[in-house]
Amino acid sequence: MTSDMVNINTDNTISAPSQRTVSADELLLRAPRARAFITGSEAVSEAVKRANIDMSIAYPITPQSESMHLIGDLYAQGYVRDYYRAENEFAVMAAVHGAALGGGRVFTATSGPGTLRAMEMFPVWAGSRQPIVCAFMCRGVALPPSIQPENIEMAFLLDTGMLMFHAENAQDFFDMILAGYAIAEQPEVHLPVGVFADGFFVTHTREVVMLPPDDVKLPAYSPDIAPIQPFDMEHPPVRQTRDPLMNKSNFTSYAASASWHQEILAAAERARKHINKYMGGLIEISNPNAEIMIIASGTAASQSREAIRILEREGITVGLIKVKSVRPFPTREIIMATEMAKLIVVPEFNAGGWLAREVKASLNNNDRVLAGPRVFGGMAMPSEVIVDEIKKVINNKC
């Protein structure tokens, strides 16, 4: 990271820092990178610094607050054109929606109960085909209250229509936010992107992140190539909600709404090739020929890597399938990657086991899937917990 000086003009306005516009391919795939020792929250700020953002709107909630405070600093430095704190999380997501409808590139973030309070807006974003990028720093949402790491909120968002990427660490967090814009703004995609990280584990941990120069930025967003023009009143979805005919309970309304839902699902499928390009695929595989496979996303992937090292010292070979894209879900990739697997273990940081359900739904012979171990309420998942679950299955089969 570099230290940024604020350029204040004689009329007290702030001059934007000098940045070169480069293509997403250049910024994400080819630009040289340098080491920075930063937290996940700082990684979010570094991504936004290079994202050429028109507006960012904030409301504080732990563990998201620091990242949006840092983006306020970026506004003061001229990297973000407009920024303010809204009344609550729903107000944030509604205002961000309005800014996107007006043709702006926008960013915001939330966590846990904030996600739930704003829930109504996420399918609205998708339904109006807005390429909003939102970072979710996942935390507990249930009683008794907990601000600790847990990603159950991801389960609630699976069918909102947004693309969903799950970051394992601060490097993923940085890369996925920038890649989110490159993917979301493709004309044939044009859907919102949620980039998720397990709160505290990622947001408050300092680690080495490889960053491109901070004097480069993405090209400005061009709403002219979007499938939905800014405030276009004559095309779906605005016309569907505007015209009285469409609001009646009749065949025309059903057909119009159903076709639009199908288009949103199809747009997510069309995002696959862009995810492959900018994120290196929907999954990442280690030890692909192993008969024991762990499928994990987010922080659980890091714990799984250590579990694999422990088991290797004991002569047990285990592979890892890291899920980077939750929506669209890598069904075909998981089927192919588990062809040789006799045991599939799915560790998770939530009580419901949403990833295990997705994996089981993808596989015909899913009796080999062990849905767990799972921890929640802020509990840690030592790698030994994963090791013990695998050993129990091995010992029971002997």
Image: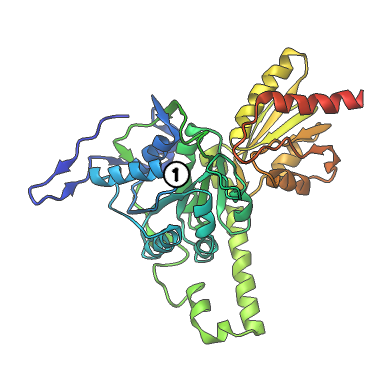
Question: Farthest residue toward the front?
Answer: 144
Q: Residues within 10 Å of mark 1 (few under 14, many from 20)?
A: many
Say if residue 203 shows up in the picture: yes
In the depicted structure, whether residue 301 falls above or below residue 86: above
Q: Quadrant of residue 265?
A: bottom right
- SS state under label 1: loop
Q: Position of residue 348 (x, y in %)?
A: 67, 38
Circle 1 is placed at which residue position? 64
Question: Quadrant location of residue 302?
Answer: top right
Residue nearest the viewer, comparing 91 with 211:
91
Question: How many labels sit on residues?
Answer: 1
Q: Name the kind of residue labelled 1 in the image.
A: Gln
21 vs 281, left or right, is left
Please indicate whether residue 379 sits to the left or right of residue 47 in the image. right
Could you tell me which residue is drawn at 65 percent across and 26 percent down?
Answer: 382
State the image coordinates of residue 313 (x, y, percent, origin top left).
72, 13
Where the C terminus falls, by quadrant?
top right
Image: 83 above or below 386? below
Nearer to the camera, 324 or 226: 324
Q: In terms of depth relative to the viewer, which is nearer, 8 or 205?
A: 205
When asked about the image quadrant of residue 96, the answer is: bottom left
Identify the residue shown where x is 75% and y is 30%. 293
Relative to 27, is 36 above or below? above
Residue 364 falls left or right of residue 359 = right
Instruction: Give the position of the N terminus as an image quadrant.
Output: top left
Residue at coordinates 60% horizontally, 76% vertically from top-left?
256
Pinpoint residue 262: horizontal percent, then vertical percent. 63, 65
Which sits in the foreground, 211 or 24? 211
| Residue 234, image x, y percentages | 45, 78
Residue 290 visible somewhere in the drawing: no
Residue farthest to the left?
10
